[in-house]
C-alpha cells in the first residue's frame, strides 16, 4: 500500500501484468463542469459498481478552498496539486495495487483524512490534470477528453456550483474568469493526448435546449481500433439522410475519424448502432447492464439520451477490448 507523500518510483510497462488480474484504466479528463461525472456515473452503472472503482483527481489538491484564495492560485494549476503523488498512485493502480489516497471535500473545500482505494476490473480516473505528464498518460488503456463548447460548459458550471456547492451565479462567473488563463495553459492542451475527444453540443447552438437532445461529435484517433465505424455509417442511412455521419478529418494536423450523431436521434437508429457495436465487439460476454446505457439524471428524473448511449457504448467497447486483450 502506498502512503500519501511516499516518493517510491514504480516502474510500469503496460501489459506486463497478468491481463486477467490487472485493471483497465480509463481517463475521463476535461475542464470543470465539462460532464466528466455524468459520463463516469454512466459507465459505472453499465459495468456495475462491483466491477468499477472511480478515482477523482480533485482529491490531489494541495490546498483547500480558503488557502487557494489567500495564495491566489486555482485548482487547475499543477502547482496546486500533488502531481508526483498522482503519478505514483496511477502507476500502482495500473499494476493492480491499492493506494491510500487523499480526499478533497467539495462541500466545504477542505482536505479530509485519506482513505483506502482498491482497484477493481476497471478504474475510471476522472479529473482536471490526469494527462498532465507522460508518466500519467502511460498508465491509461483508454484516454477520453470532454470538450463541450465553452458557453455550454459555463452554463453547466453555473448550474452545478449554485445547486450543489452553495455559490451565487456572479461568484461562479467571476471564478471562471480567474481560471481562464490556467484552463488555456494546462487543461485544454491535454486534449491532444486523448484517444477519444467527446463534444456534446446543442444542434442549433442555442443554450435553451432539452438535455436529452444534445448532438455529439466524436474525434476517434487511430491510437485505438474502431472496427465497426463503416458498418455503423452504412446501416444507419435513412431515406438518403445520415443522422449519423462518419468522415475522415485532421485534428491537430493528424488524421482522425470523426463520428457525428444528431441530437434527437430516432431510437430505432440508435438501436441499430448499439447492435452493430454489441455484435462486433462480442459484448454479450462481459456481463453488462444493457438497460443502463444512455441513462442520465436530469434533476430528479432519470432520462435517456441516444447520443449519450452511442458514446457510452463506444467507450464500453474499448474497455472490454482492453480487458480481453490485456492492454
Image: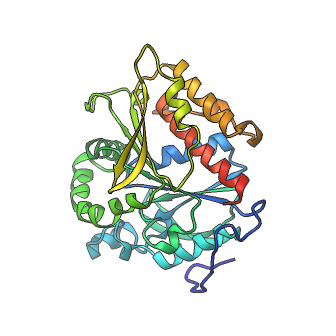
As displayed, is residue 174 above or below residue 151? below
The residue positioned farthest toward the top in the image shown: 239
Is residue 305 visible in this depiction of the protein?
no
Q: Residue at x 63, y 41 (%)?
A: 45
Between 236 and 314, the one lying in front of the other is 236
Quarter of the picture containing the N terminus is bottom right
Number of marks drawn: 0
Between 130 and 13, the one lying in front of the other is 13
Is residue 102 visible in this depiction of the protein?
yes
Left/right of residue 292 with respect to residue 173 in the rendered view: right
Q: Residue at x 49, y 43 (%)?
A: 38
As displayed, is residue 274 above or below residue 50? above
| Residue 267 locus on image (x, y percent) | 53, 20
Left/right of residue 97 with respect to residue 203 in the rendered view: right
Between 265 and 83, the one lying in front of the other is 265
Q: Quadrant of residue 10?
A: bottom right
| Residue 291 locus on image (x, y percent) | 65, 29
As displayed, is residue 99 above or below residue 201? below
| Residue 74 locus on image (x, y percent) | 31, 67
Q: Residue at x 54, y 24 (%)?
A: 235
Quarter of the picture containing the C terminus is bottom right
| Residue 244 locus on image (x, y percent) | 44, 28
Q: Quadrant of residue 274?
A: top right
**Colour mapping:** rainbow
Amino acid at each position: 500500500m502506498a502512503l500519501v507523500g511516499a516518493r517510491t518510483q514504480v516502474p510500469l510497462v503496460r501489459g506486463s501484468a497478468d491481463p486477467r488480474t490487472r485493471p483497465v484504466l480509463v481517463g475521463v479528463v476535461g475542464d470543470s463542469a465539462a460532464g466528466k461525472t455524468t459520463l463516469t456515473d454512466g459507465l459505472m452503472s453499465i459495468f456495475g459498481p462491483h466491477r468499477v472503482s472511480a478515482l477523482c483527481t480533485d482529491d490531489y489538491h494541495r490546498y483547500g478552498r480558503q488557502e487557494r484564495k489567500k495564495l491566489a492560485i486555482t485548482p487547475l494549476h499543477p502547482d496546486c496539486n500533488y502531481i508526483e503523488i498522482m503519478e505514483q498512485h496511477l502507476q500502482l493502480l495500473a499494476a493492480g495495487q491499492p493506494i491510500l489516497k487523499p480526499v478533497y471535500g467539495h462541500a466545504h473545500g477542505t482536505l479530509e483524512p485519506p482513505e483506502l482505494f482498491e482497484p477493481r476490473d476497471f478504474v475510471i480516473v476522472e479529473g482536471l490534470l490526469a494527462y498532465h505528464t507522460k508518466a500519467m498518460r502511460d498508465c491509461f488503456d483508454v484516454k477520453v477528453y470532454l470538450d463541450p463548447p465553452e458557453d455550454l460548459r459555463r452554463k453547466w458550471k453555473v448550474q452545478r456550483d449554485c445547486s450543489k456547492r452553495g455559490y451565487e451565479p456572479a461568484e461562479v462567473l467571476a471564478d471562471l474568469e480567474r481560471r481562464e488563463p490556467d484552463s488555456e495553459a494546462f487543461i485544454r492542451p491535454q486534449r491532444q493526448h486523448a484517444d477519444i475527444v467527446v463534444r456534446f453540443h446543442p444542434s442549433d447552438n442555442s443554450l435553451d435546449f432539452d438535455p436529452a437532445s444534445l448532438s455529439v461529435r466524436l474525434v476517434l484517433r487511430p491510437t485505438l481500433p474502431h472496427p465497426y465505424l463503416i458498418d455503423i455509417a452504412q446501416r444507419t442511412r435513412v431515406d438518403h439522410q445520415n443522422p449519423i455521419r462518419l468522415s475522415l478529418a485532421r485534428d491537430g494536423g493528424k488524421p482522425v475519424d470523426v463520428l457525428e450523431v444528431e441530437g434527437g436521434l430516432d431510437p430505432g437508429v440508435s438501436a441499430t448502432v448499439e447492435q452493430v457495436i454489441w455484435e462486433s465487439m462480442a459484448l454479450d460476454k462481459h456481463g453488462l447492464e444493457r438497460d443502463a446505457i444512455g441513462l442520465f439524471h436530469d434533476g430528479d428524473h432519470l432520462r435517456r439520451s441516444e447520443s449519450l448511449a452511442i458514446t457510452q457504448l463506444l467507450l464500453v467497447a474499448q474497455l472490454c477490448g482492453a480487458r480481453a486483450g490485456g492492454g
